[in-house]
Amino acid sequence: MLQTPHLRKTLVTGGAGFIGSHLVDALCRNKMEVVIFDNLSSGKLENIKQWLDMPNFNFERVDLLKLEKIQKHLSGCETVFHLAANPEVRVGSTDPKVHYEQNITATFNLLEAARKNGNIRNFVFTSSSTVYGEAEKIPTPEDYAPLKPISVYGASKLASEALITSYAYTYGFKAIIYRLANIIGPRTQHGVIYDFINKLRKDSKKLEILGDGTQTKSYLDVEDCVNAMLTGMNHLNNGVKIYNIGSEDQINVKEIANIVCKEMGLKNVDYVYSGGVDCGRGWKGDVKIMLLSIEKIKALGWKPTLNSLEAVEKTAKALLK
């Protein structure tokens, strides 16, 4: 529950998307005045339809690559939740410009608009576990170094972190950076669970699994993620804070395939492994082992309600409805 009454008019970029729409749900339930920026490239109005006719709610179809449109609709906002980004890590290996524009340029434009607006007091950014690259320390804490992302996506998130940090200190607003594990749940439109379900709907006898199936990572339910983000906001103070958000355990890709098959009522499915690249990764730039240390955010009073397996089961059920 959000406990910061001084956060009045709030902007959510990517607010019609997966995580963004769940955050919007929480903010609107807390009676916040909310403005959404979304270009609807991956977001859907359906995700926020319950709020469209509500007072103190405003949706703007805004492309963050167009600075003048951002400035026009930012007036009066005190807090920014910046979630808009291209979520497909794999895209970077074939079209790196997408991540450069949608992550770095978009973030710079938003920061510039915030600087010129002058009213922005709080800037919240959803970064990614991919900024750590292949961390040698597992679970990986926020102060791990050096940060060496192995994907263009991870690099674009790290570059955005640096821009936000510099703007916060130079222009005097507070910032929180959240480094997210794999966030899953209702409304997701990408990722391994989504892909497996679509593949099995086309062919229930065979499932292609990218990589060797041993990729092992942390998965967190989206409602737990939003609650963690709001917990951090309740402890907002000067400067820049960085928090990992994830579960406290891991699950591998083959186990996820087993769960999806079980939820679909399928037996004896033939798993066909692509073999992947670079020692069984799903694609170039895929981090094979990931688990974040979440002790810092837990110290604020938050902890996940679902582990990785439970989150996967919940997501599979939701997507199959």
Image (cartoon, grey):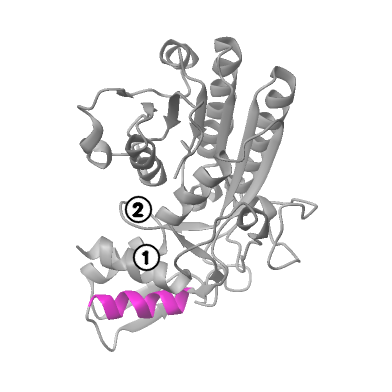
Q: Is residue 63 visible in this depiction of the protein?
A: yes
The residue lying at 40 percent from left, 79 percent from top is 272
Quarter that holds the N terminus = top left
| Secondary structure, magenta segment, majority class | helix
Q: Does the magenta stretch include residue 255?
A: yes
**Residue 166 pos. (x, y %):** 72, 27
Rendered image quadrant of residue 17: top left
Answer with left or right where residue 59 lies relative to residue 2: left
Residue most toward the bottom?
268
- Give the vertical position of 114 relative to 194 (above or below): above
Q: Is mark 1 on a helix, strand or loop?
A: helix
Q: Which residue is drawn at 33% across and 41% down?
A: 25
Q: Which of 216 and 22 is in front in this view?
A: 22
CA separation, marks 2 and 1?
A: 9 Å
Is 8 one of the magenta-colored residues?
A: no
Q: Position of residue 239 (x, y in %)?
A: 72, 31
Decide if residue 157 is on the left or right side of residue 269: right
> Does residue 88 show up?
no
Q: Residue 193 carries which label?
A: 1
Question: In the image, is residue 208 above or below residue 293?
Answer: below
Q: In which quarter of the image is residue 60?
A: top left
Spot occupied by residue 251 in the image (x, y as percentages of width and height): 51, 74
Instruction: Answer few, some or many: residues within 10 Å of disc 1's Cα (few below 14, many 20 plus, some between 14 and 19).
Output: many
Relative to 10, residue 286 above or below? below
Instruction: Name the residue furthest right.
Output: 146
**Quadrant location of the C terminus in the rendered image:** bottom left
Provide the secondary structure element on which disc 2 rests: loop
Which residues fall within the magenta stretch?
Answer: 253-264
Disc number at residue 188? Answer: 2
Q: Do the residues labelled 2 and 1 touch (CB within 8 Å)?
A: yes
Write the residue at 39% across / 36% down.
Answer: 27
**Tag 1: residue type?**
Ile
